[in-house]
Image (spheres, rainbow, N blue to C red):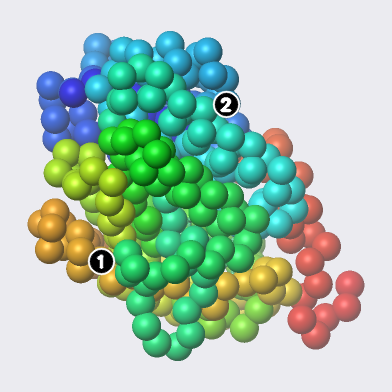
Amino acid sequence: MKILVTGGAGFIGSNYVYQVLHRHPEDEVVVLDALTYAGNLENLKQLERDPRFRFVKGDICDAALVDDLVKGVDAVVHFAAESHVDRSIMDPGVFVRTNIIGTQTLLDACRRNGNVRFHHVSTDEVFGSLGATGLFSEQTPYDPRSPYSASKAGSDHLVRAAWHTYGLPVTISNCSNNYGPYQHPEKLIPLFITNLIEGKTVPLYGDGMNVRDWIHVEDHCEGVDLVLRKGTIGETYLFGGRSERSNAEITNLILFEMGAGQGKIERVADRLGHDRRYAIDPSRAERELGWSPKTPFLHGLRKTIAWYTSNEAWWRNVKSGAYREYYEKQYGSRPTPGVSR
Ligand code: NAD
Ligand code: DAU
């Protein structure tokens, strides 16, 4: 199969490209990525000389380019997005452009070129926030609450509309919080690991009791690939790690594994509109695709700490330059509860 992978220079996209070419040696992959602050060609370095791989730098909103690339492939797997909730709170416009207009641009190209198979990678955040109990399932109504999740919900609806209206062969997957190698250090787990290596504090939002359902990126990528090859057209599949943890619990685990003390925790003001709890019921994917999350959380976390420890050049490069400005904007003036600056 020849696959166009959008956002393949990002965290999950790059892990997906490696996995696909490993599992399906006969496949070919074309990556389309704009190399925003989150995209990094270093993530794909091991494929530089692989004849099955081609990289194209470009924007998913560029209709002519997208049309040209879609013409030559059997399927599109769509990861490209603005992905960070805190950035969406600072500047929602680019999320609307990339996540909504970009997705529609790809759908139009798939339709124009003979109904190319389209898989859309989405998030559990479209379902809003859970109380103390319950799980998201494929039947949960949409209730997005941040600019990021609202833009992803918009893109999901456009993908479903392309199936219902034009019969475009689509599938959607909504996944919980990923962690693993090549994740940008703006996100909780790599931020905290790399801050500790640098001897800095770790900024924990609010009371630290918000809960996320953590899944290793390789398990998510396996799920995406199974949906692409075995999923029922027009359907949605949810992936999660069956591994709910509060942010405080994650923080304590990282501190313990890295031999750091509680004094490294800096309590900072909460994220605006911070969703309290996400958790996934992945039983449909387990039943229908034979998928399951295989990486136990502690094992995956240790592997991830080891990866960031032995790939310092990668994240130091990412954390330098423009990222410094973002970090200062996000955390520099953020009031610490009970402390006046
Ligand atoms: P990421 O931010 O690491 O990577 C996004 C990639 O998209 C980057 O390489 C970036 O350069 C590229 N990109 C951004 N705008 C583009 C544009 N206009 N044109 C072309 N490329 C563009 O994100 P990620 O964490 O790898 O997430 C990938 C996808 O998975 C996203 O759609 C996200 O919503 C979804 N998702 C992420 C998680 C998670 O925990 N990270 C969980 C569920 C779903
Ligand atoms: O649920 C899936 C989503 O998971 C994906 O769709 C998003 O693309 C991905 O970024 C992620 O969103 P979150 O907002 O859950 O991830 P983040 O790593 O930013 O935050 C995880 C939790 O940790 C969240 O409750 C906020 C908290 N947090 C985060 C940061 C960056 C902190 O306490 N301090 C921090 O500095």
Q: Can residue 302 be seen?
A: no
Q: Is residue 298 left or right of residue 278?
A: left
Q: Name the disc covering residue 61, or none.
A: 2
Q: Is mark 2 within 8 Å of ligand 1?
A: yes
Q: Amino acid at mark 1?
A: Pro
Q: Name the disc covering residue 144, or none.
A: none
User: How far from the left and from the top, in percent, is residue 245?
Assistant: 41, 77
- Given residues 190 and 97, the one toward you in this image is 97
Q: Is residue 287 left or right of residue 161?
A: left
Q: Is residue 61 above or below residue 284?
A: above
- Location of residue 140 by image quarter: bottom left
User: How far from the left and from the top, in percent, is residue 230?
Assistant: 14, 44
How far apart are the two marked residues, 1 and 2, measured between alpha carbons? 32 Å
Q: Give the position of the C terminus as an image quadrant.
A: bottom right
Q: Can residue 281 be seen?
A: yes
Q: Residue at x 34, y 29 (%)?
A: 76
SS at circle 1? loop
How many neighbours does mark 1 have within 10 angstroms: few (below 14), some (14-19), or many (20 or more)?
Answer: many
Q: Is residue 16 above or below residue 62?
A: below
Q: Is residue 58 above or below residue 269?
A: above
Q: Residue at x 28, y 46 (%)?
A: 234
- Given residues 254 and 274, the one toward you in this image is 274
Q: Is residue 138 above or below residue 166?
A: below
SS at circle 2? loop
Q: Residue at x 28, y 31 (%)?
A: 117
Q: Which residue is mark 1?
A: 282
Q: Is mark 1 within 8 Å of ligand 1?
A: no
Q: Residue at x 43, y 11 (%)?
A: 68
All told, the count of numbered labels is 2
User: How far from the left and from the top, in percent, is residue 41?
Assistant: 47, 26
